[in-house]
C-alpha cells in the first residue's frame, strides 16, 4: 500500500467530525430559503415536480403488481421484470441525456424526457400482452434515466452554497412525494372503474404536460450559460491561433469546433477522474439497493404476508412516505453543518436498527399501528441518507460535465441494483406461507415470507454503504462556478484530502489564480 493511500485512509475518521459543534453555528433554515431569488425558486420548483412525477410513474408498477400479474396471466416475480428493466435501461437515458444536457443545455433534454413520460405511460395503460408491457417499461427506463442529472443540475447549480444542503434534501424528497401520490391515486383509481389498473397509468401521463410548459418558460441556468461562453471563447481562441499560423479557420467550422472542445474536455475528465467516477457508481449502487430493497416489494409484503386491507396498506405507505420526506429534508439540511458522510453513516445505523420491526412485527398480536411506526422511521432513515445525495454528487462532480457525471453515476448504480426486487421476490418464494383469509373474506393463496428476505437483504446493503461512505471522499461546500471548480480540481483534493484540508489548499489556489488575473488586467 503506497504512502499517499495510507495518508488518505488516516484522514477518513478525523474528517467525519463537523467543523464546529456549536448549535449557534447552524444557520436558520428560513433565512436560507429567503436567500434564493425568484429564478432559483422557479428552477427548483420545476425540477422538484418533474422528479416527483418520475417517481410516481415508477411506483405505478409496484403498487399494481398483483393486478398486473392477474391481467397478463403471469407470476408476481415475472411482473417484477417490469421494474428491473426500468432500472437497467435508465443507464442508457442517463448517458444520452447527460451528454445532451452538458453540451446543448439543460432545458431541451428535460423537455424531451417529460414528453416521453406522456407517451410511454399512455402506452403502458393500453398494453394487452406481457411482451408489450415489458417493451413499454424498458423504453420508460430510458426516459426516466435521463431526467435525474438534468433535474439535479437545474435545481441546485445556481443556488447559494450555504443553502445547498437544505435544498438537496427537499429535492430528493420529490421521490418520496411521488411515491406518496402514487399510493393515494392507486387507492382512488385502481379497481374503482371497469378498467382495473389502467386508469392509474393514463392519469400518470397528464401532469408532465404542465411540467413541459413550465420548463419552456424558463431560460438555461446561469452556470450552464457561463460554461457555454467558456467553450465558445476557447474555440474562438483556437481559431485565432490557427489563422495566425496560416491554417484555415472561420465561422464555417464553429459548431464542429465547439463540439470538439466539449469532447476534448470530456476525455480529460475521464482520464483524470476515473477513480472518483468509479467510487460514485459503487456508492450509488448501494444507495439504490437501499431504496429499492426497502420499498419495491413492501406493498406486496403488506398485502400477502401481513394480510392488510387496501385501506390499511395505503395508510402505512402514506405514513412511511411522510417519514421519508421529513427525513430527507431534515438530514439534508443538517448535512450542511454535520457533513455529508457523517449524516449518511448515522442514517444507515438508524435504518439497520429498525429492520426487524419494519419487516417482522407480529401484526396479529401487536396491531398494524406498530408496522406504521416502524415504516415511518425506516423510511426516515433511508430517505434521510438519500437527502444528502444530490448535493454530495454535485460537489464531487467535475464542473464541465456535472449533468453527465451525476446522472450517469446515479443510473449506473441503478443498473447494478436493478434486479433487487426480482432477487427478493425469487428468494421469498423459497419461504412459502400457508394460505390465509383476510378479514374481508378474501383467500390469499400465494403467500411468501418476504419480511425475512427484505430484513437480511437490507442488513447487507447497510453494511456495504457504511464501509463505502467511511472510506470515501467529501467536498462539503464546493462552489459550482467555473473558476472555483477548476481551482479545486487542480489541487487534487476531491479524492485525496478531507474537506478541511481541501479548503485550505483550495483557498490558496484560488488566491493565486486571482493574483494572476489581476496582473493580466493591469498588463492589458
Image (cartoon, grey):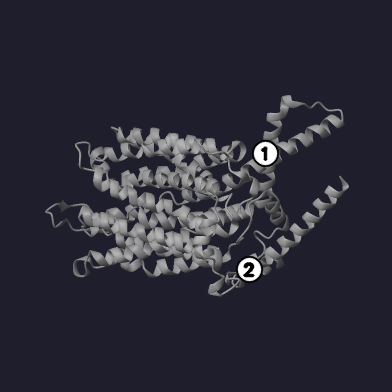
Q: Position of residue 222 (x, y in %)?
A: 61, 44
Counting from the top left corner in percent of width and height, residue 367 is at 21, 67
Image-quadrant location for residue 60: top left
Q: Secondary structure at mark 1?
A: helix
- On the question of residue 4 being in view, the answer is yes
Q: Which residue matches tag 2?
A: 9
Quarter of image, res 7: bottom right
Residue visible at 83% across and 29% down? Answer: 243
Look at 62% across and 46% down and name the residue there: 223
- For label 2, count other residues whose C-alpha is less than 10 Å away and answer few (under 14), some (14-19) or many (20+): some
**Residue at label 1?**
262
Instruction: Identify whether 199 is placed above or below 493.
Output: above
Residue sitting nearer the eye, 139 or 50:
50
User: Residue farthest to the bottom?
Assistant: 22
Q: Residue at x 34, y 40 (%)?
A: 204
Residue 216 vs 406, above or below: the answer is above
Quarter of the N terminus within the rendering: bottom right
The residue lying toward the viewer, choosing from 346 and 283, is 346
- Residue 37 or 477: which is nearer the viewer? 37
* Percent coordinates x, y for residue 399 in the rendering: 64, 49
**Residue 418 picture location, percent across and down:** 43, 49
- The residue at the far left in this view is 441
**Mark nearer the N terminus (2 vs 1):** 2
Amino acid at each position: 500500500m503506497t504512502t499517499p493511500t495510507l495518508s488518505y485512509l488516516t484522514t477518513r475518521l478525523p474528517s467525519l467530525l463537523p467543523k464546529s459543534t456549536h448549535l449557534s453555528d447552524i444557520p436558520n433554515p428560513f433565512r436560507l430559503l429567503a436567500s434564493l431569488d425568484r429564478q432559483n425558486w422557479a428552477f427548483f420548483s420545476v425540477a422538484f415536480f418533474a422528479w416527483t412525477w418520475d417517481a410516481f410513474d415508477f411506483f405505478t408498477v409496484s403498487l399494481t403488481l398483483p393486478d398486473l400479474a392477474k391481467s397478463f396471466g403471469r407470476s408476481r416475480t415475472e411482473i417484477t421484470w417490469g421494474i428491473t428493466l426500468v432500472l437497467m435501461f435508465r443507464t442508457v437515458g442517463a448517458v444520452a441525456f447527460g451528454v445532451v444536457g452538458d453540451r446543448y443545455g439543460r432545458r431541451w433534454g428535460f423537455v424531451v424526457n417529460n414528453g416521453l413520460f406522456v407517451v410511454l405511460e399512455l402506452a403502458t395503460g393500453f398494453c394487452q400482452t406481457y411482451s408489450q408491457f415489458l417493451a413499454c417499461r424498458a423504453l420508460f427506463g430510458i426516459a426516466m434515466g435521463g431526467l435525474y442529472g438534468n433535474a439535479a443540475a437545474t435545481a441546485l447549480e445556481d443556488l447559494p452554497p450555504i443553502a445547498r444542503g437544505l435544498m438537496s434534501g427537499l429535492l430528493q424528497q420529490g421521490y418520496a412525494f411521488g411515491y406518496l401520490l402514487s399510493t393515494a391515486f392507486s387507492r382512488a383509481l385502481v379497481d374503482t372503474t371497469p378498467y382495473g389498473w389502467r386508469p392509474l397509468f393514463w392519469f400518470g401521463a397528464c401532469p408532465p404536460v404542465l411540467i413541459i410548459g413550465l420548463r419552456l418558460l424558463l431560460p438555461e441556468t446561469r452556470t450552464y450559460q457561463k460554461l457555454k461562453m467558456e467553450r465558445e471563447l476557447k474555440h474562438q481562441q483556437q481559431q485565432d491561433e490557427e489563422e495566425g499560423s496560416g491554417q484555415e479557420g472561420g465561422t464555417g467550422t464553429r459548431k464542429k469546433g465547439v463540439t470538439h472542445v466539449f469532447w476534448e474536455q470530456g476525455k480529460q475528465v475521464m482520464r483524470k477522474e476515473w477513480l472518483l467516477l468509479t467510487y460514485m457508481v459503487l456508492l450509488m449502487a448501494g444507495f439504490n439497493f437501499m431504496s429499492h430493497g426497502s420499498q419495491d416489494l413492501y406493498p406486496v409484503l403488506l398485502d400477502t404476508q401481513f394480510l392488510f386491507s387496501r385501506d390499511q396498506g395505503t395508510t402505512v405507505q402514506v405514513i412511511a412516505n411522510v417519514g421519508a420526506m421529513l427525513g430527507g429534508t431534515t438530514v439534508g439540511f443538517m448535512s450542511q453543518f454535520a457533513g455529508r458522510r457523517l449524516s449518511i453513516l448515522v442514517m444507515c445505523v438508524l435504518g439497520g436498527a429498525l429492520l426487524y420491526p419494519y419487516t417482522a412485527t407480529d401484526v396479529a398480536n401487536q396491531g398494524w399501528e406498530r408496522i406504521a411506526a416502524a415504516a415511518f422511521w425506516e423510511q426516515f432513515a433511508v430517505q434521510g441518507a438519500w437527502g444528502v445525495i444530490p448535493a454530495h454528487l454535485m460537489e464531487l462532480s467535475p464542473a464541465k460535465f456535472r449533468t453527465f457525471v451525476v446522472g450517469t453515476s446515479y443510473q449506473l448504480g441503478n443498473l447494478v441494483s436493478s434486479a433487487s426486487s426480482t432477487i427478493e421476490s425469487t428468494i421469498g418464494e423459497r419461504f412459502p406461507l400457508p394460505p390465509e383469509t383476510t378479514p374481508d373474506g378474501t383467500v390469499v393463496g400465494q403467500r411468501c415470507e418476504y419480511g425475512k428476505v427484505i430484513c437480511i437483504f437490507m442488513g447487507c446493503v447497510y453494511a456495504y454503504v457504511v464501509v463505502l461512505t467511511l472510506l470515501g471522499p467529501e467536498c462539503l461546500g464546493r462552489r459550482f462556478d467555473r473558476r472555483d471548480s477548476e481551482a479545486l480540481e487542480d489541487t487534487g483534493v476531491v479524492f485525496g484530502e478531507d474537506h478541511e484540508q481541501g479548503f485550505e489548499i483550495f483557498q490558496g489556489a484560488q488566491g493565486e489564480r486571482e493574483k494572476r488575473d489581476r496582473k493580466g488586467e493591469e498588463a492589458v
